[in-house]
Amino acid sequence: MTNKILHAIQSGIKGNLTVPGDKSISHRAIIFGSLSKGRTVVSNFLDGEDCLRTIHAFRAMGVTIQKEGSNVTIDSNGIDGLKEPKQPIDLGNSGTTARLLLGVLAGLPFHVTLFGDDSLTSRPMDRVVRPLRQMGAKIDGRENGKYLPISIRGGAIQSISFIPPVKSAQVKSAVLLAGLFADGNTNIIEPTTTRDHTENMLQAFGGDITIDQKTITILTNQSLKGTTIDVPGDISSAAFFLVAAAIVPDSKLTIHDVGLNHTRTGIIDVLKKMGASIEVKEERHIGGEIIGSITIESSDLNGIEIGGDLIPRMIDEIPIVALLATQANGRTVIRDAEELRYKESDRIQSVVDTLQGLGASIRATEDGMIIEGNTSLTGGVGNSYGDHRIGMMIAIASLIAEQDTQLIDPACINISYPSFFADLANVQQK
Ligand code: SPQ
């Protein structure tokens, strides 16, 4: 594990940037391409470690998937063509692969064992195991299926009506995917809306789904057909650069071709509410997703309160929003974000420990954090805790720190953004 020394920036963040493809959409393109008959062609696929795990899983079940950089071609015989893998499947660090794959496997009449790295092995899987068992899948695993490794034997499952007990797109998606194989229509009543890429993509593959306010109904026995998917840039990756441009003086940056799905744009709402100088242009719609550009300039910022329905729309951006809040005038309070405790690290604790170590005034609460703004960051040592989003947050913090910052374990950034440091170098004025 090589650490990285990061230096403060001498001038503004400037220019134009496109960020790599959306991680959530890239996973789903592989999943639906594998469940569909015929050829699926994916462009701007995220070539990050997590999405490669999803490719590996479906290859292990006999799907032909070819990848050249960010272009992926999937040739599948559909659901009936999937075969029992010979070996247990290694999911690495990817929570999305684990939970969505369990949903698919619930409907397939064979045995599979799933395992992951230390972080994934500590993340709760019972949130999907419970409804999938209710549908009839046979699942066993560590601590009665609460954690990986998990073995599953699916097939002949029943439809259910399900109210997810946690605000989670992964739980919703697992049940929706299992619903494709159920003996009747499956309903999910979602009290708080979470990202809807599964719903959008199912329709792009010719599937039938109805959405009536909070109730999503997926019809059984559908035949999905291969299609073309152009993955928008990932707003969760763009968020690091939006915050960099907001807090580094004399910055002006435009990010192009970025996904602006309203279930994901909480970061834009937060920046606007804090007083950032930001302009968003929705430019086109593809496969149910909105794509456009965001221009942002550095400006004075004010602390705000963040909670409620906004949280699922920015859940992965909270680490970088915490850094943003250290540079705003006054106090920022983040609440209703207890789900952060179940991510690649406990992101309440890792954000607070890391930013305190870099000189910020921040403390943890049970379901969020309280940040006192307008503090100078000292730099020093920042540990990513093996969590890509904490690693990138530290790299952006280092731009405005008084001294150099040593980033411990930067390699985890490859999970979602392999070209992060190259892109960061490109928007720094030489
Ligand atoms: O895949 P993984 O590891 O769970 O990734 C994360 C991330 O920060 O990249 C969460 F740690 O994103 C999740 C996100 O938090 C991706 C996701 C999806 O694609 O459906 C949904 C969110 O998780 P959840 O638990 O709220 O459903």
Image: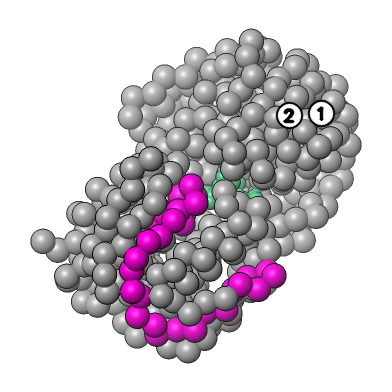
Residue 231: x and y in percent read 43, 41
Asked if residue 332 shows in the view, the reply is yes
Quadrant of the rendered image containing residue 425? bottom left
> Quick one: label 2 or label 1, which is nearer the N terminus?
1
Q: Is residue 388 magenta?
A: yes
Quadrant of the rendered image containing residue 173? top right
* Labelled disc at residue 184: none
Render colour scheme: one colour
On screen, residue 242 above or below 22: below
Q: Is residue 168 left or right of residue 25?
A: right
Establish whether ligand 1 lies closer than 8 Å to the Cβ of label 1: no
Residue located farthest toward the left when viewing the structure as drawn: 430
Work out whether residue 77 or residue 10 is closer to the camera in this orientation and state it: 10
Query: Can you identify the residue that label 1 sits on?
Result: 140
- Position of the N terminus, as image quadrant, is top left
Query: Can you identify the residue that label 2 sits on?
Result: 150
Instruction: Identify residue type, mark 2.
Output: Ile
* Residue under the image location 83 percent in, 52 percent down: 163
* Residue under the image location 57 percent in, 59 percent down: 347
**Labels 2 and 1 touching (C-beta < 8 A):** yes
Residue 396: x and y in percent read 34, 63
Residue 363: x and y in percent read 57, 76
Instruction: Identify residue type, mark 1.
Output: Asp
**Which residues, given as a range, are shown in magenta?**
364-392
Name the secondary structure under disc 2. Answer: strand
Residue 208: x and y in percent read 69, 37
Establish whether ligand 1 lies closer than 8 Å to the Cβ of label 2: no
